[in-house]
Image (cartoon, helix red, strand yellow):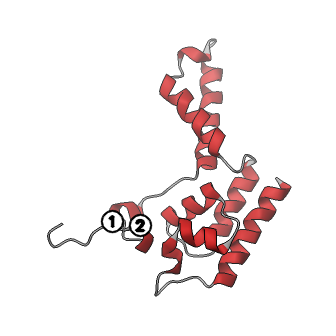
């Protein structure tokens, strides 16, 4: 890469376009696809005629890998993670993978510990505890 800095997600060097993009967690995509599916059912007597195979496979995937299913829980997860001034990319990785320990979180998203914006271990632990409470009471 001549003159350009190499991309590195561990250091949150992922390009301006991606940094500014709105990312969605699997559970958010599942809610959106569920609503769309309901709309398609209401519009047609035979909803399977209007649902593509890609739509079906996408819906199966996000439902299988969604850690949260309750719409209120999904909203709370985004709110909690947003409090920590995470990049959208970081927020979605943590929301999708649900690490249980600080070590797991840092291994999955090393950029949360980069200098200049590093979260303290206590803050990361509080964030993970808040997320586990949501999961427990969902």
Up-down: is 75 above or below 2? above
- Can you tell which mark lies on residue 9? 2
**Residue 18: which quarter of the image?**
bottom left
Up-down: is 48 above or below 110? above
Tell me the SS state at disc 2.
Answer: helix
> Could you tell me how far apart the alpha carbons at marks 1 and 2 are, in whole angstroms?
9 Å
* Residue 38 position in % (x across, y down): 65, 29
In the rendered structure, the answer to whether residue 79 lies left or right of residue 107 reads right
- Can you tell which mark lies on residue 15? 1
Residue furthest bottom in the image? 116
Residue furthest right in the image? 137
- Can you tell which mark lies on residue 28? none
Report if the CB atoms under discs 1 and 2 are less than 8 Å apart.
no
* Residue 80 position in % (x across, y down): 68, 68
Neighbour tally class for label 1: few under 14, some 14-19, many 20 plus, Cα within 10 Å: few
User: Quick one: 81 or 40, which is closer to the camera?
Assistant: 81
């Amino acid at each position: 890469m001549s003159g350009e800095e190499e991309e590195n997600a561990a250091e949150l060097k992922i390009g301006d376009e991606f940094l500014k993009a709105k990312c969605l967690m699997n559970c958010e995509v599942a809610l959106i696809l569920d609503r769309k599916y309901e709309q398609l059912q209401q519009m047609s007597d035979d909803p399977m005629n209007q649902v593509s195979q890609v739509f079906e496979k996408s819906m199966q995937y996000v439902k299988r890998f969604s850690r949260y299913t309750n719409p209120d829980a999904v909203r709370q997860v985004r709110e909690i993670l947003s409090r920590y001034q995470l990049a959208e990319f970081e927020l979605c990785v943590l929301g999708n993978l649900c690490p249980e320990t600080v070590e797991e979180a840092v291994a999955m998203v090393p950029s949360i510990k980069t200098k200049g914006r590093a979260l303290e271990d206590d803050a990361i632990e509080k964030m993970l505890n808040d997320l586990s409470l949501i999961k427990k009471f969902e």
